[in-house]
Image: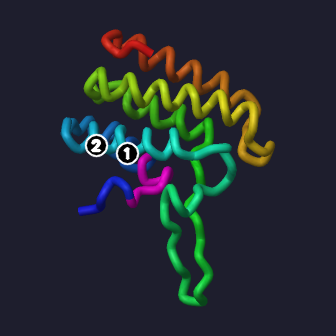
Amino acid sequence: PNRVRSLAPRNYQNAFLAYGWRRHRHARCLDRLVEGMRRLLDGHSPPGPKLDSQLLFGYECKNGVTVHADSFRINSLGVMLAALRDLAIDAKVMEGCAASMIDYVHRSVAESPKSMRRPGDAAQFLLQLARFLDVNPAVDA
């Protein structure tokens, strides 16, 4: 099994999408994934296109070049919230993650290069957050 600390942002997105599509609820696994994602969100400062190697190790190509993992994008956080909406993540775990997502979006809007942004991405994120909170009222974000 993969350790959560070795997962890149795209791995989190793919896992949440798969769990969401299948409506599969494995509480311990989902809670660990959400906690692991929070570690990356909080540790990535300033939000740039690649994660720092101290936060998440890259992989080495056959030619010896190290490739660092892509960072989170605001639009991908909205996609993940939509996937998590109906999975009933533990409220306390999700509160921390939602706070980290909101902080990351705020920092990304202020500091990320334009190449990491899409028109309306922050507004779309807020819409997905509102939809998530509507279905999960126990989460206080």
Instruction: Please indicate whether residue 87 sits to the left or right of residue 69 in the image.
Output: left
Res. 73 image quadrant: top right
Q: Residue furthest bottom?
A: 63
Magenta stretch: dominant secondary structure: helix
Dot 2 surroundings within 10 Å: few (below 14), some, or many (20 or more)? Answer: some
Vertical arrangement, residue 93 with respect to residue 11, above or below: above
- Determine contact: label 1, label 2, CB under 8 Å: yes
Q: Give the extent of the magenta segment.
A: 6-12
- Residue assigned mark 2: 32
Res. 68 image quadrant: bottom right
Name the secondary structure under disc 1: helix
Q: Residue furthest front?
A: 54
Measured from the top left, where is residue 103 in percent x and y? 57, 28
Name the secondary structure under disc 2: helix
User: Residue sitting at 32 percent across and 25 percent down?
Assistant: 86
- Residue assigned mark 1: 36
- Identified by mark 1, the residue type is Gly
- Identified by mark 2, the residue type is Arg
| Residue 132 lies within the magenta run | no
Measured from the top left, where is residue 74 in percent x and y? 62, 36
